[in-house]
Amino acid sequence: MEQQENVQPTFEEIQIPVPFGYVSAKWWGPRDKQPIIAIHGWQDNAGTFDPLIELLPKELSILCIDLPGHGRSSHIPPGIPYYLFWDGLTILRRIVRHYNWRNISIMGHSLGAAIGFLYAASYPDDTEMLISIDTVAPVVFNPAEIVKNTGPFLDRFFYYESLGTDKMPAYGYSDMIDLVMDGHHSTLTRKACETLMKRGMYPVKDNKYFFSRDTRLKVNRLALPTYETVLEFAKQIHCRYLMIKAVPGRVRDNWVLYKNVLDTIKESTNDFTYVEVEGSHHVHLNDAPLVAPYILNFLYKSDPSVK
């Protein structure tokens, strides 16, 4: 593989129309090429890929979207809960149809990886490749736990729905970054938090900031698929597949079940790659140089022009 020139890629801010407003995105690289669609994790935003993309060839075209309610994208209309995995699948298909793209390539982290999983399974003949970072599929819970938590989560949704901007606390810049670090239990570096908050907050008066994400996103466990359903989706994934697992990653994930899902994907596709890198759940953001070579090798294997 040839040594890369030290030329920083550039991006353009765009807005993609949707029925309830728009999806904001950062389009890196050439606009005359169909891009890899990059999808961030829960309560993150398109900025999560900044450090990684800066290490990739400037000739790559990559569209990093803000999911609804995240970053600079429109929020889901009032009165409607977020069904995170299905909302993401729907919005991804809307974007594909908007541009009339074919043979889609997806890169996702966490929630974004799960959305990519659902898309690749739902449109197996229209998905070229999927790069998943530290998540395989939608989270899997015991059915009894799903039933038990449905009522409390709905009531929590109504609580967050009742919070208008007049009830939302504003914070100074440093306090905002501290809150993000605390919320991730210090698994994100301060620099990584600052990168996310470039589009994860907005200024108000007196040098204070609000979070830009929709508070209703905190209700994140509605309409979850069963483990058996996830396995059936996995059987339909036939595209080229790269799984980058952070170690230890997010320790609360049930990797015994995810391992079974990965084994199913491995059986259903002829091009399966699994690698492990040392780091936390946001390894692509904290330690992008550990992740970039694996992605570049994966892309290079399929397209010799990527060097």
Image: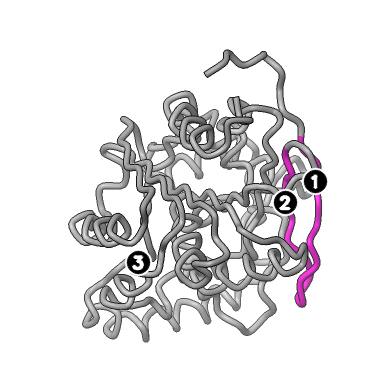
Q: Residue at x 58, y 31 (%)?
A: 304
Instruction: Name the foreground residue: 307 vs 277.
Output: 307
Q: Residue at x 50, y 59 (%)?
A: 116
Residue position for label 2: 25
Instruction: Name the foreground residue: 162 vs 43.
Output: 43
- Identify the amino acid type marked 3: Ala
- Identify the amino acid type marked 1: Glu
- The Cα–Cα distance between marks 2 and 3, rounded to whole angstroms, is 28 Å
Whether label 2 touches label 1, CB < 8 Å: yes
Magenta segment: 11-28
Dot 2 crowding, Cα within 10 Å, few <14, some 14–19, many 20+ = many
- Identify the amino acid type marked 2: Ala
The quarter of the displayed image where residue 56 is located: top right
Query: Is 194 rendered above or below residue 19?
Result: above
Which is more N-terminal, label 3 or label 1? 1
Query: Is 216 rendered above or below residue 173?
Result: below
**Pair 2/3: label in front:** 3
Q: Residue at x 60, y 78 (%)?
A: 162
Dot 1 crowding, Cα within 10 Å, few <14, some 14–19, many 20+ = few
Residue position for label 3: 234
Q: Which mark is residue 13?
A: 1
Residue 107 location, x and y as percent? 53, 48
